[in-house]
Image (cartoon, rainbow, N blue to C red):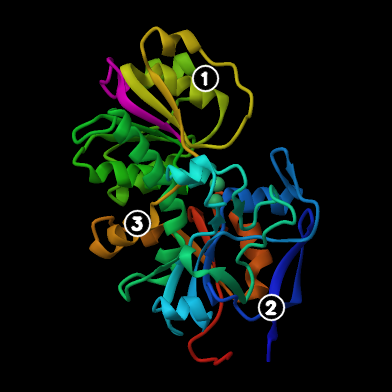
Amino acid sequence: MDRSTVKAAVLLGAKSLEIQSVELSLPLPGELQIEIRSTTLCGSDLHYYNHYRNGDIIVKSPLALGHESSGIVKLVGSEAAAEGWKVGDRVALEVGIPCGNCARCLEGRYNICPTIRFRSSAKSNPHYWGTLQERINHPAKWCHRLPDSISYSQAALLEPLSVALHATRRTERNGSLYPGANVLVIGAGAVGLLVAAVTNLTGTSKVCITDIILERVDFAIANGWATKGYVAPPGLTTGLEIATDLKAKLNMLNGYDVVYDCTGMEVCVQTGIYAARSGGALMLIGMGSPVMTLPISAAALREVDILGGFRYANTYQLGVELLASGKLQNVEKLVTHSFRGMEGIQTAFRTAAQRMDENGQLIVKVEIETGSDSVEVE
Ligand SMILES: [Zn+2]
Ligand SMILES: [Zn+2]
């Protein structure tokens, strides 16, 4: 047997998802064959699902989505075996595969490698399929072993957690995030919530989170990820108005040491510039409008550093340690809705597109669980 057949959820067009049988070869010497156990859906998956594109990246051929994933090793390539990998190892998948040779890769910033291939993204051709498949072959180098204390769902969240760790690390290096810093997080989706949770770990108890949805802000505070919340009152429309109101209500008239925008929306980025203190920083994590009009002099003349964060590099090990330590409390609560099996994927996408479910429960992360300990697939 040199290959097998596995099921994959393949996107053929907008909202057109088909469960197909695809051939899977044996893993290459440096690869592991992994049975996917958990994939949590991300905003980019939703964009591809709903529009067959993500911003200006258009899908050119059928594509399997999913990139926040974990699973169990089922087959081990010879080189991977020599490195100690074993059938039954539980892993989180880091799904961006950089070239490893360019200047950016060599300086450790492989997330901005110009030729990185990222599963479920239509940017590279042929498209590198995502993890909404029963099994995949993945380079062992980009698999991260999990201790038993980390569940598959938590491990899937290592991907968005990595985004948060990368962004906060960059602001730490910039000097704007430090123990005791005043932090503002704009946008309380999964990444915003994780940024709040991570900044809360650095010893500060002054993390404020803002969103247009009150339930999300309350969710952050209830889970101990932020201490304060703000929802802009109706009628405030400009970034200046919102930032002025926010700073007044939160008694932060001098502004925040560091602001994280996790929305990518113009008005939010404007708010972020005005809400940052002189000499502070604004970190842009959200992917939204590619071109914006910003009050750039309000940044330049007050030396507010505008930083960008794109995905992550060298974060998974830290994420595994953080989750294993139990310091990052309630992370698994981000998964508010879970669906079982490949058949559940359509429903999962429909659920993820909503803010609240039919019972009035907040929807944050939607998970698809696949595979089973009781079924032997080897
Ligand atoms: Zn994502
Ligand atoms: Zn590279």
Does the magenta run of residues contain 177? Answer: no
> Helix, strand, or loop for circle 2?
strand
Q: Quadrant of residue 9?
A: bottom right
Q: Are marks 2 and 1 in contact (CB under 8 Å)?
A: no
Residue 215 shows in this picture: no
Image quarter of the N terminus: bottom right
Does the magenta run of residues contain 253? Answer: yes
Q: Nearer the viewer, mark 3 or mark 2?
A: 2
Q: Tag 2: residue type? A: Leu
How far apart marks 3 and 2 lie (CA) works out to: 30 Å
Residue marked by disc 2:
24
Q: Residue at x 47, y 60 (%)?
A: 336
Q: Nearer the viewer, mark 3 or mark 1?
A: 3
Q: Tag 1: residue type? A: Gly
Write down the region rendered in magenta.
247-261
Residue marked by disc 3:
319
For this rendering, which residue is in front, 295 or 1? 1
> Helix, strand, or loop for circle 1?
loop
For this rendering, which residue is in front, 77 or 333? 77
Residue marked by disc 1:
235
Q: Earlier in the sequence, mark 3 or mark 2?
A: 2
Image x and y of residue 365, in percent: 50, 56
Q: Quadrant of residue 207?
A: top left
Q: Earlier in the sequence, mark 3 or mark 1?
A: 1
Q: Does residue 352 appear left or right of residue 274 in this picture?
A: right
Q: Residue at x 48, y 39 (%)?
A: 213
Q: Residue at x 50, y 12 (%)?
A: 295
> Helix, strand, or loop for circle 3?
helix
